[in-house]
Image (cartoon, rainbow, N blue to C red):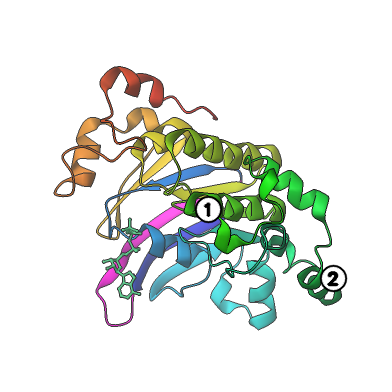
Amino acid sequence: MTLRLDELEFHHPGGRAALQGISLVIQRGERVAVIGPSGAGKTTLLRVLATGLKPTRGRLEVLGVDPWRLGRRGLRRLRSRIGMVHQSPPIPPRQRAVTAVLAGRLGRWPWWKALASLAYPVDIPGARAALARLDLEEHLFDRCDRLSGGQLQRVAVARVLYQQPELVLADEPVSSLDPRLADRTIGELHRDAQARGVTLVASLHAVDLALRWFPRVVGLKDGAVLFDLPPVRVTDGLLQALYAGEAATPPTQDGRPLATPVRGIARRPLCS
Ligand SMILES: Nc1ncnc2c1ncn2[C@@H]1O[C@H](COP(=O)(O)OP(=O)(O)OP(=O)(O)O)[C@@H](O)[C@H]1O
């Protein structure tokens, strides 16, 4: 098992509960989408799973251990086994794409190799191959502050592909991409997770992508799990309840409503 959450709660300092009563078990190799309206708690949940935030209450197990019982070294080691794609990638602006990708393995390399990699890229072919999977090969030596938001998001995905972590967490990893690239990028994350038998948890704004790609979909609302189902069982009624008060229709990648005939196809996961 990769993740176990037991009656987990999280309160941001000075805020109300961003997560409440979350109980989930995610087995190794599962691919799970987390959907829900703005403010539902998707980012908070992923940051808790990435051990960036400590739960206020309840139990959490990540890759077989309670992160918050580990010492500093143990926690650092655990984090090097987790790959996180952030919604706005925290990449230093002057860093080149090649260095940003290689940074994926900094936590696993000996200090001398990590240091050398910052001065001169130690594995250019590896970085090139990861970027090529996302059509970004020609930007290998570009500075990150000269890339578009969508290109930067794909560099962050390439970094995780290069890192090869045991747990991949992706927080709205395609929010800046057009529908074709979004599909391609989610597809690459899937192929990587499936090929290596590792767990992928992604929060997604676009319901169509979640239903099309993920064998398990968790609907989060007001910090609690509203449903946890395979896509074929996510009904219109559940989606309406999830997004009630936010939008007339559930959000999609291309802005078009989830039309029924398309949905029939869309709800069959491409990878199962
Ligand atoms: N740093 C913070 N301090 C206080 N409250 C916060 C903080 N970050 C988030 N929150 C609150 O926690 C709740 C969950 O926020 P979160 O960002 O996890 O939602 P989300 O589902 O990812 O939203 P979005 O889709 O808009 O990114 C919201 O009510 C938000 O206002």
Helix, strand or loop for disc 2: helix
Regarding residue 166, the answer to whether it shows in the image is no
Q: Left or right? Give the position of 227 relative to 128.
A: left
Residue at 60% of width from left, 39% of height from top? 188
Q: Position of residue 178 (x, y in %)?
A: 43, 39
Q: Amino acid at mark 2?
A: Lys
> What separation in Å lies between label 2 and label 1 (alpha carbons)?
26 Å
Regarding residue 228, the answer to whether it shows in the image is yes
* Vertical comparison of 186 with 123: above or below: above
Q: Quadrant of ligand 1?
A: bottom left
Magenta-drawn segment = 12-28
Residue at 54% of width from left, 64% of height from top? 61
* Vertical comparison of 10 with 192: above or below: below
Label 1: few (<14), some (14–19) or many (≥20) C-alpha neighbours in 10 Å: many
Q: Amino acid at mark 1?
A: Gln
Does the stretch in magenta take in 15? yes
Q: What residue sits right under mark 1 in the picture? A: 153
Q: Left or right? Give the position of 2 relative to 131.
A: left
Residue at 69% of width from left, 61% of height from top? 104
**Of pointers 2 and 1, the one earlier in the residue sequence:** 2
Q: What residue sits right under mark 2 in the picture? A: 113
